[in-house]
Image (tube, grey):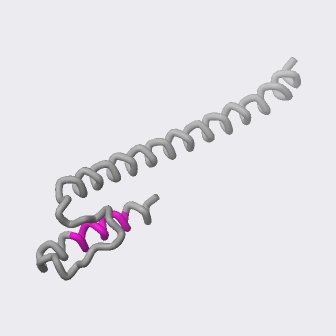
Amino acid sequence: MSYLVTAIGLPLAILVFLYEQRRERQNDQEEIFQRLFDEYRECLKLVVEISNLHLLQREVSTHELSSGLKERRFVIFGIRVSLIERA
């Protein structure tokens, strides 16, 4: 009887352990994805609030912007790049 428990119980315990590890890894990935999504959404809110920087347009003449607006534009691009790097 003890051999039967050992033969069935040990592989079953290993399978349960592997299943739990996989589920934990998936939960961690989902949490990371959710945090990145939340940060990206906040970045888009910032882009909408500062619409005079024209961050969503491809061709914008930066000569029209003041130095303060150029700096804000550069900072927001830095935020976007850091989000992409973390993703």
User: Residue 59, image x and y in percent?
Assistant: 33, 73
Q: Start and end of the magenta stretch?
A: 73-82
Quarter-of-image position of residue 61: bottom left
Asked whether 81 falls inside the magenta stretch, the response is yes
Q: Which residue is depicted at the point 49% across and 42% down?
A: 30
User: Residue 1, image x and y in percent?
Assistant: 87, 17
Q: Which residue is depicted at the point 34% across and 46% down?
A: 38
Left or right of 80? Residue 23 is right
Asked whether 76 falls inside the magenta stretch, the response is yes
User: Residue 87, image x and y in percent?
Assistant: 46, 58
Q: Main secondary structure of the magenta part?
A: helix
How many labels sit on residues?
A: 0
Quarter-of-image position of residue 58: bottom left
Q: Given the current orientation, which residue lies at the most extreme top position? A: 1
Q: Which residue is depicted at the point 82% across and 27% down?
A: 6
Q: Which residue is depicted at the point 86% across and 28% down?
A: 7
Left or right of 78? Residue 21 is right
In the rendered image, the vertical position of residue 22 relative to residue 42, given as above or below: above
